Amino acid sequence: MRVLDGLEEVYRQDDSAQIRIGKSRDTTANKVRFCMSGEVIQTKQAAPLPTQFSLFAWQTREKEAEEQRRVLLQRIADLESDERLEREDIISFSLAQLNGVYSWFISASRNQFKQEEANLLQLNILEEQVSARIKLYEAELEEREEQLKEAARRAWKEEMLQRKELEEELARRAEWKKAQEKRLSAALTFIVVQEKDARRELEAEEPVDFVRLVEKEKEDRVAAEKAAYEAWLATPEGIAFEEENKKKEKKREKLRKQREAEQKRIIAACRHGPGGSSVFAGDNPADKCFSCGFIWDEESSLYIPVNVAGKRKSSALLLSIAEKKGT
């Protein structure tokens, strides 16, 4: 509670002076100031000399002012006492509130500490579980890695063993091939020598039958070559050579069929003859059709694109020019 909210002034006037009772605020601190007797004396000196009646009246009013000043001071003291009591009540209430807040804070802190401790315990349990799972996973991973390494080592050993067996097999085949080649060379040499000896004998004995002998020699050579070829075909190299020839023959047959189908397609696709027929069909087929872009090639006996035929002619012309310059 505030003692004074503002300035309170009491003015009293009489014939000789004016008494002012009030309160003002000092610049350094809040203080209560009242008009002292010095101010009244100055007022008396400034006023004209009073008469006996006015002096009595002034004294009477002075006494009343002193009484009012005393009453005002008493009221101010009562107000300050009330303010002090109320301030003490406010301080006591504030301390009680502060104590309650402090007690609540301590209780809340303890509860929070217990909650955090429980959470920390759960976190520790979770960390232990995660650590156990990580260790188990690492153990499984190490075991799996060891199994993979063992499998890789076994596969590497098997591969090295297979490679060694393959090298030995290739070495055996190479030796066998050299032996067969030597045997074949010896057989051919023997056959050639026998043929030469037989030819000499026949030429010496029967010069008239030279033609017959030559034919007989050719037949024997063909038979010997056939026997040698058949013997060679029985070898792995001969079998592989025969299979390669069959594959090539199949490819040639397939290519021939493709060419025939392509030629049939070219002939059937042409529609630039009379009545929308093909110029490449009929009894007198044409050699070329520039609308279709194909021309008959004498070398391959096929219908080929015009640009390919032009390139061939250009190449042949350049080759002939080069030959003429060279001659």
Image: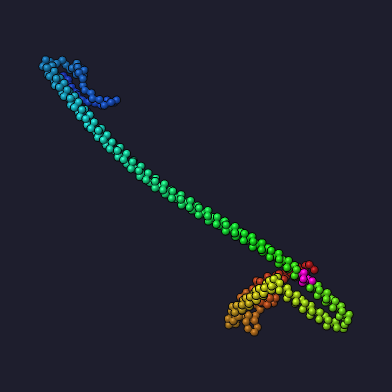
Q: Quadrant of residue 57?
A: top left
Instruction: Find residue 157 and report its horizontal and vertical position in percent.
Output: 62, 59
Residue range (magenta): 181-186
For image coordinates 81% across by 73% down, the residue present is 190
**Residue lying furthest right:** 204
- What is the quadrant of the C terminus in the image? bottom right
Instruction: Find residue 308 and report its horizontal and vertical position in percent.
Output: 66, 71
For image coordinates 65% across by 80% down, the residue present is 286
Instruction: Find residue 276 and report its horizontal and vertical position in percent.
Output: 58, 81
- Asked if residue 34 lies in the magenta stretch, the reply is no
For image coordinates 25% across by 33% down, the residue present is 92
Instruction: Find residue 207 and report its horizontal and vertical position in percent.
Output: 88, 82
Foreground residue among 81 and 230: 230
For image coordinates 18% across by 27% down, the residue present is 78
Foreground residue among 243 and 230: 230
Q: Give the left or right position of residue 106, taking residue 40 as reference.
A: right
**Residue lying furthest bottom:** 283
